[in-house]
Image (cartoon, rainbow, N blue to C red):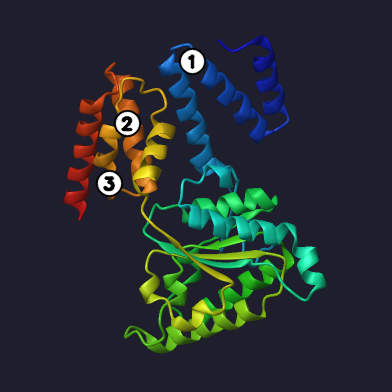
Amino acid sequence: MATADQILSLIRNHLNNDDAQFRKVALQISAVEARSGHAIVARTIQELLNQKKTSIGTIRLVSKNKEVDDLLLQVDTYDNIKDLIVSQELKGKLERVIKEYIKKETLSKHGLANRRKLLLYGASGTGKTMTANALAKEFNLPFFVVRTEKVVTKFMGETGQKIGRIFDFISDVPAVYLFDEFDAIGSQRGMDNEVGEQRRILNTFLQLLERDNSDSFIIAATNSIESIDKAMFRRFDDVIEYKLPDKEQRLALLHEYLYTATDLDFSSAEPLFESMSHAEIKIVCSDIFKESLLNDRTIDLSLVQTIVNMRHQLSYQIS
């Protein structure tokens, strides 16, 4: 049960609009409930917090500049770098980005600049967007997502103008900016469809990216690295690959998302999640918890197998 101090703390944090502290206290209550054997209560708290984390209520349209208010979305930052379950190699690259940011004044004295233009690539659901969000939180900077569907249009010259307005904003407002689905902007100039206009869009972005000397972080993410024009690679300070989780990472993810499953043999369950992305594993684990709560079932290997099979059937239907 939540203590009186925890209840009072929740109320104070709510009144002060301190979402971070509110989440912290709520998670403490969830942990206490889980240790007390109240798995349903603990999981319900987690589910409610996750709804807050991903709901449209956490997204605010940019209002500082009417030139870009339909091109950028400001998103609250909840993710932490330490929570990323990725390879040690990838963690090392991100730690270097963070260290260079912390030491940027020292680097500047020697005529050097910190890494702040990153190209992230890999399969969908492997942590690219989470990385951008977590870096923004680490640097205590606002986080903006470029609305690619609003930027890229069929009218000649309009896309380039919108990209120019975004870079003006990047220069004026230090933040982390994510260009998701970057292949819509950075695809190869030799591709057949609308070659001329695509070349103009690409050249505009290349020039603006190269000229940018702001304090902002520019992060591009793509699932299709092979479609990105080769000229783009040398404009970024680092190109980082995101892979599907390996055995060790899958086990870590299962322990994180199925933390109340005391009757589950995680080593036996892990192979069932092979070839799944981080995001897919999270979705499947959420479905496992829902089935357990709704039908009062113990989370064991049989239940996990059933839900995984349902996920595979869904994938086959839409492929």
x then y, percent, for residue 82: 57, 44
Dot 2: few (<14), some (14–19), or many (≥20) neighbours within 10 Å?
A: some
In this rendering, position of residue 40 left or right of residue 171: left
Of helix, strand and loop, which one carries label 2? Answer: helix
The image shows residue 21, relative to residue 234, as above or below, that is above
Q: Dividing the image into 4 quarters, which one contains the C terminus?
A: bottom left
Q: At numbered mark 1, what does the secondary structure look like: helix, strand or loop?
A: helix
| Residue 211 in view | yes
Task: Give x and y (percent) for residue 292.
Answer: 30, 22
Q: Amino acid at mark 1?
A: Arg
> Where residue 28 appears, x then y in whole percent?
58, 22
Structural distance between the alpha carbons of marks 1 and 3: 30 Å
Q: Could you classify mark 3 by the number of other residues whose Cα lies within 10 Å: few (under 14), some (14-19), or many (20 or more)? A: some
* Callout 3: SS: loop
What's the CA distance linking mark 3 and mark 2?
13 Å
The residue identified by callout 2 is 266
Checking the image for residue 35, the label placed there is 1
Residue topped by disc 3: 274
